[in-house]
Amino acid sequence: MTAERAPLTLIGSGLTGPLLAISLMQRGFPIRLYERRPDMRHVHISAGRSINLALSTRGIYALQQAGLWHQIQKIIIPMRGRMMHSVAGEITFMPYGKDETEVINSISRADLNIALMNAAEEHGVSIHFNQRCTGFDLRSGDVHLRDEETGAESMIGADAVIGTDGSASVIRAEMLKLQRFNFSQQYLDYGYKELTIPAGHDARQVLELHALHIWPRGTFMLIALPNIDGTFGCILFLPFEGESSFAALDSESNLLSFFKAEFPDALQLMPHLIENFFASPTGAMVTIKCSPWHVDGKALLLGDAAHAIVPFFGQGMNCAFEDCTCFLNLVGRFGSDWPVLFSEFEKSRKADTDAIADLAIENFVEMRDRVADPHFLFRKKVELELEKKYPAQFVPKYAMVTFHRTPYSVAAERGAIQDRMLSELCDSVQRMEDVDWNKAEALVQRELAPLTGP
Ligand SMILES: Cc1cc2nc3c(=O)[nH]c(=O)nc-3n(C[C@H](O)[C@H](O)[C@H](O)COP(=O)(O)OP(=O)(O)OC[C@H]3O[C@@H](n4cnc5c(N)ncnc54)[C@H](O)[C@@H]3O)c2cc1C
């Protein structure tokens, strides 16, 4: 086995690896990228093929900084709000933001990954596919690799390694062997399954295109996001065990009865439900927190490897892309002083990634349960009105997270204050004309103005 040296080695060419690689190449750092999967541009990989992600302000900003947004913009579909489907087939629309500029964007994970890898190669990044990192020596900096096709083992030397290898990070697993490494993982009792609504005649969408569709059912839900080819990528979120659960959907007849009872309108649009459902694995959702994210100047975790979160705020990728923004700002200050840079990166980012992890869990209950509640929809209207009246002080929590780049920890803190204010204003009334706007003014001045200015 021969060892060669390279300045920076990235493990994992998912969403974050190629973006970070491009941005570092632009700053003059040669990068090598190792990915365990085959090249999805040439080999069909089923996992994550059909799934769409919601791309919003933080992610867009990072793509803009790398000069990639004009390209990515061609493969997104803006979604203006949530479209809720009741069991009886009634539809309610709730806008995400205060106007047409506040939208989230549906993008296919595979198309985004491909666009990023193409751009990375155009920037001179060498991506080595079928190369699984099997270990990393934290003292010497040697990276151990196994070729997934041939089984051949190799070793490369690296001055520093960045683990962009996702929630099951091997680099993090190496850090776990160190003394005083803090690590927690919390699985939800819920799993998810990817399903598809095919395009209609002439590749037309069979549901409203510019919306994220939700079938909220209290303890579970189905969602659908539009694709540019006319299909909708759906995700069914269900408990693993119990009455309405993945365990209970163990036969074709149970599956069909469940969909007939709970999602009758969606069922009509899913002619391949049975094949889809039994072919698609049931995924688990986990929150991972750990610290430190780095070992001296030798290794750093970034993206899901450092902080995996559950998907209910649509922020995992956006947060990982914001990691890149933050990291690159520090490169501007510290250059290749990796020990200082890695340490500063964690210091500047940890409170925010912990905050979005907690907000994402909180939003799970909102999506599956509260969006169907008329009082919740009323609160949302009051919230938008408060934003209109006090744009400098009152920005809804969802907007702070999704449409602004307010640090997540600040959004969580101010969001909690605003939630209490909304309870005071809305709990005993049901109509806009009954809201006490004088009280609202007093609350804004007392609770929010000290934080945001008058
Ligand atoms: C159901 C679901 C829905 C989601 N929806 C959204 C959304 O709407 N919006 C949003 O912002 N986020 C969403 N997310 C989160 C988002 O997918 C992740 O946060 C994002 O993919 C993290 O990027 P990453 O580059 O850190 O990790 P990944 O994208 O997971 O990439 C890691 C890469 O590392 C490779 N790898 C792993 N181990 C090794 C190894 N040992 N050697 C070499 N390579 C390795 C993997 O093959 C992969 O290519 C969702 C997640 C899920 C599960």
Image (cartoon, rainbow, N blue to C red):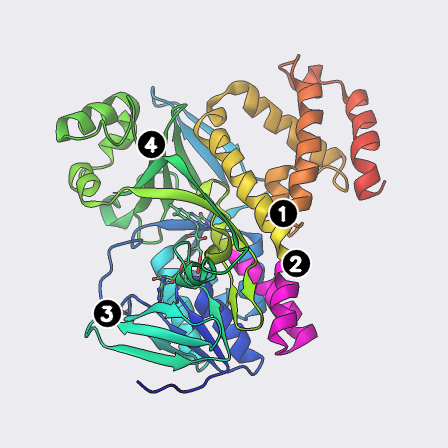
Residue 333 placed where, x, y %?
A: 70, 73
Direction from residue 432 to residue 111 in the image, left or right: left
CA separation in Å, label 4 and label 3: 33 Å
Residue 316 placed where, x, y %?
A: 48, 50
Amino acid carrying mark 2 in the image: Lys
Precedes in sequence: disc 1 or disc 3: 3
| Magenta region, residue range | 320-347
Residue 347 is tagged as 2
Where does label 4 land, which residue? Answer: 238
Residue 253 placed where, x, y %?
A: 14, 26
Displayed-image quarter of ligand 1 = bottom left
Precedes in sequence: disc 3 or disc 2: 3
Please identify the quadrant where the N terminus is shown. Answer: bottom left
Q: Quick check: is the Cβ at mark 4 less than 8 Å away from ligand 1?
A: no
Helix, strand or loop: magenta stretch: helix
Give the vertical position of 91 relative to 39 (above or below): above
Q: Quadrant of residue 294?
A: bottom right
Which residue is at the front of the view, 451 or 435? 451
Where does label 3 land, which residue? Answer: 148
CA separation in Å, label 3 and label 2: 36 Å
Q: Nearer the viewer, mark 2 or mark 1?
A: 2
Precedes in sequence: disc 2 or disc 4: 4
Helix or strand or loop: what does disc 4 sit on?
A: strand
CA separation in Å, label 2 and label 4: 36 Å
Precedes in sequence: disc 4 or disc 3: 3
Direction from residue 12 to residue 149 in the image, left or right: left
Q: Nearer the viewer, mark 4 or mark 3?
A: 3
Residue 408 is tagged as 1
